[in-house]
Image (spheres, grey):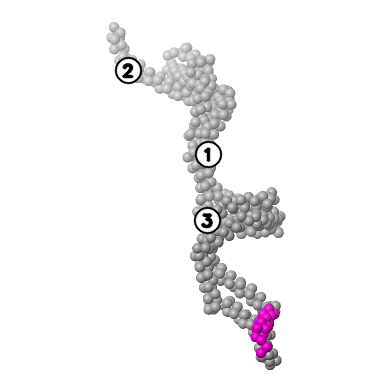
Amino acid sequence: MNYKRKADITLAAVFGFFFVAAIFEHFNPSSFVVRLIYFVSEAALVGGIADWFAVTAIFKKPLGWGFHTALIPRNREKVIEAVASMVQKELLRVDVIRKKIERIPFIDTLICYVEKQGGAVSLTDKLTGYVRRYAEKQKPDELAERLARYIRLKAKTWELTPKVQEAGEWALKQGYLDQGLDRLVESMWDKVSEGETRQVILRYLEEIKEEKVSNGGSILRTLMGFVEMSDGLNLDDAADAMQIELLLTLRNLQDHQHPLRVSLKETLLNSAARITSDPGFETQVEQLKNDVLDDTLLERALEGILKTALNVAAAPSTSLEPNALYQILYPLVEKWWVNVQENTALRETFNSWIVDTLCRVIQNEHDMIGNMVRETLSAYTDRDLNQFVEEKAGNDLQWIRINGSMIGGVVGLILFLLLEFIYTPIIGPMLTPVIAQFIR
């Protein structure tokens, strides 16, 4: 049973009670109990009718009474504007919405979701797929042309000389100079130890001997013949000795503390310092930069690099056979993902960024809340609007009617008792002579 029906039944019951009490009061007006019941039921009926009229007047014209009734249909625009304003400016204020949003752990929720999907593996799969689809749509020649145009535009402001110096200092601090020397010595060792190198040395010695003999005249040629006959000059042995000496020298260069290695390193560093401090060095670097940028070789080099990169990116990848792009991206994504999970400050920064972004959007579009309410309510007919209000506050309004009958009965009881036991026996006799004298 709804509250409107309860209120109607209450009012009907009060009316029936009053009707019965009126009949008894007509036939037995001197009975205290009858008069009490009649007075209380009358007051309850008046209170119930008054509140029924007031509640009904909110929605329509009760009994056709048109003076200050049908308040909602008559003030339709004001009601709509009041509701929209209340929702926008009171219930859904920006500061209230922000407080609610700040309680939402966006990043933690996102981390849990991604972990359930596979974590860094899932992220890498998605990133690889996106890059592969992008690479399939690109043309290396067009990309190379755009990239070359961008490089030429930006390169005008590049100062390469300090970068060369910084790169040299960085390489020195990172130990790359020693690594480079080690690799150079290793490659030279492999080359010197080959039999072909011995043959080169032998040919070089023979060329020297022939040059000396041809320039020395007949006497020197005669002496050289005696020396060779007595095995005093064996070029094969000399070539072997020189090859061994070269290998021993390279072995010394492999020792970082050997004076020869230290001397070579100092010589390279001093040469690099002289070059970078040379006034003409900057001019040479700039000229080299301009020559590279002006040459069409730049586009061809970029096109080749991009073609290789796009082919690698576009290659299919599976969980069993990941392509090169996946192998490149996975360590980077995994490192970043672990950092996001372990870095509390980073998560808070991301979460604050999300909250700020959402709040900026909400603030910029906050009027949309009121507009949505206005548009929704404006589409309602008067009947729909009444029904909308009744659905939201109808029960409380019907309780006003029920309370009206109850409070009316209580007030009637109090007034009856005051009249019967205070006013009639005490106050009335006291006021009668005064009123009579005043009338005279």
| Residue 348 visible in the displayed image | yes
Q: Residues within 10 Å of mark 2 (few under 14, many from 20)?
A: few
Residue sitting at x 53%, y 18%: 61
Nearest to N terminus: mark 2 or mark 3: 3
Q: Is residue 145 left or right of residue 10?
A: right
Give the distance between the C-alpha atoms of the residues marked 3 and 1, in whole angstroms: 29 Å
Please name the amino acid that badge 2 sits on. Answer: Ile
User: Which residue is the site of mark 2?
Assistant: 426
User: Which residue is the site of mark 1?
Assistant: 362
Q: Main secondary structure of the magenta part?
A: helix
Q: Secondary structure at mark 2?
A: helix
User: Which residues are drawn in magenta?
Assistant: 199-219
Q: Is residue 306 left or right of residue 274?
A: right
Q: Secondary structure at mark 1?
A: helix
- For the N terminus, which image quadrant? top right
| Residue 121 visible in the displayed image | no
Q: Residues within 10 Å of mark 1 (few under 14, many from 20)?
A: some
Residue 335 lies in quadrant:
bottom right
Q: Which is more toward the observer, 37 or 184?
A: 184
Please name the amino acid that badge 3 sits on. Answer: Asn
Marker disc for residue 343: 3
